[in-house]
């Protein structure tokens, strides 16, 4: 069976140009929410994924697979790897575009097993934008930035208004998220995001 899937992006797009105030290449990105399973310090069994802005439209992320992340004995669970890509791709969208957006669609190709103890280096890139739709893709390299590709992913993020989170989310957790967001911006000496979808 061929691994070749549909053309990407699947619709005509404009270049996804990073926001003029996007953090510059080399910036270590902060935790966006302490309880986030993908990056949060307070999510004990979480992925603790860390990200750095790359050149152009790229964010580099990495996380180390622990015993808490197993599916088969000694191997990372596939759904958990998909979570890592959701986080890494979401970080690229949120930090480079500085627009609130949620995952509409996420597709993963699992190419090699990912053992417990290995580190996945994920390079996520902005592929294009069409209205509220932001197309992104990523490759996850095993144990080194230039290691073999173990997992690839493509995703559609949809820009939403902040009412998406206030309507559907937990108001108290949102306050915590807002504080974390301000802290991250202050650490980088920046002002707040564009909020209009
Ligand atoms: C710094 C920040 C770091 C953040 C990192 C965290 C990363 C984690 C991100 C997540 O995991 S977010 C949580 C998982 N996602 C969700 O819970 C989203 C749930 N879905 C929704 O809330 C809505 O379906 C959604 C906001 C995505 C879209 O609903 P809307 O009513 O706002 O829009 P609409 O349905 O009209 O879709 C907008 C466009 O996207 C298209 N679209 C939406 N979902 C699609 C889909 N699944 N496949 C293809 N196209 C899709 C849709 O066809 C349409 O295209 P057009 O503009 O051309 O008409």
Image (cartoon, rainbow, N blue to C red):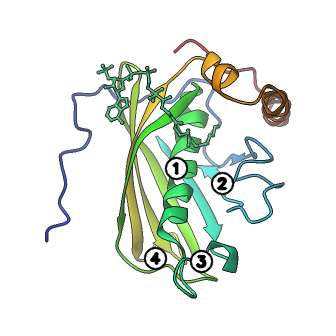
Left or right of 57 on screen, residue 6: left
Mark 4 Cα within 10 Å, few/some/many (few <14, many 20+)? few
Q: Nearer the viewer, residue 30 or 175?
A: 175
Counting the numbered discs, the total is 4
Q: Residues under labels 3 and 4: Cα distance? A: 21 Å
Q: Earlier in the sequence, mark 2 or mark 3?
A: 2
Question: Label 3's element?
Answer: loop
Q: Quadrant of residue 15?
A: top left
Question: Label 4's element?
Answer: loop
Q: Residues under labels 2 and 1: Cα distance? A: 8 Å
Query: Pointer 3: what residue?
Result: 70
Q: Quadrant of ligand 1?
A: top left
- Whether residues under marks 2 and 3 lie with C-beta atoms below 8 angstroms apart, the answer is no
| Picture disc at residue 86 | 1
Query: Pointer 2: what residue?
Result: 38
Asked if residue 129 shows in the view, the reply is yes
Q: Residues under labels 4 and 2: Cα distance? A: 22 Å
């Amino acid at each position: 069976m061929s691994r070749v899937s549909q053309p990407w992006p699947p619709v005509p797009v404009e270049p996804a140009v990073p926001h003029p105030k996007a953090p510059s290449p080399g910036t270590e990105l902060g935790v966006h929410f302490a309880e986030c399973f993908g990056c949060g310090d307070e999510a004990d069994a979480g992925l603790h994924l860390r990200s750095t802005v790359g050149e152009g439209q790229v964010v580099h992320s990495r996380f180390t697979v622990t015993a808490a992340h197993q599916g088969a004995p000694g191997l990372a669970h596939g759904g958990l790897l998909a979570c890592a890509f959701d986080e890494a791709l979401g970080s690229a969208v949120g930090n480079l575009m500085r627009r609130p957006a949620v995952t509409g669609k996420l597709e993963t190709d699992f190419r090699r097993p990912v053992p417990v103890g290995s580190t996945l280096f994920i390079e996520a890139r902005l592929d294009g934008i069409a209205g509220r739709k932001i197309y992104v893709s990523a490759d996850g390299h095993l144990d080194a930035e230039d290691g073999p590709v173990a997992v690839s992913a493509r995703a559609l993020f949809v820009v939403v208004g902040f009412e998406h989170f206030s309507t559907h989310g937990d108001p108290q957790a949102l306050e915590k998220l807002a504080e974390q967001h301000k802290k991250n911006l202050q650490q980088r000496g920046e002002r707040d995001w564009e909020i209009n979808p």
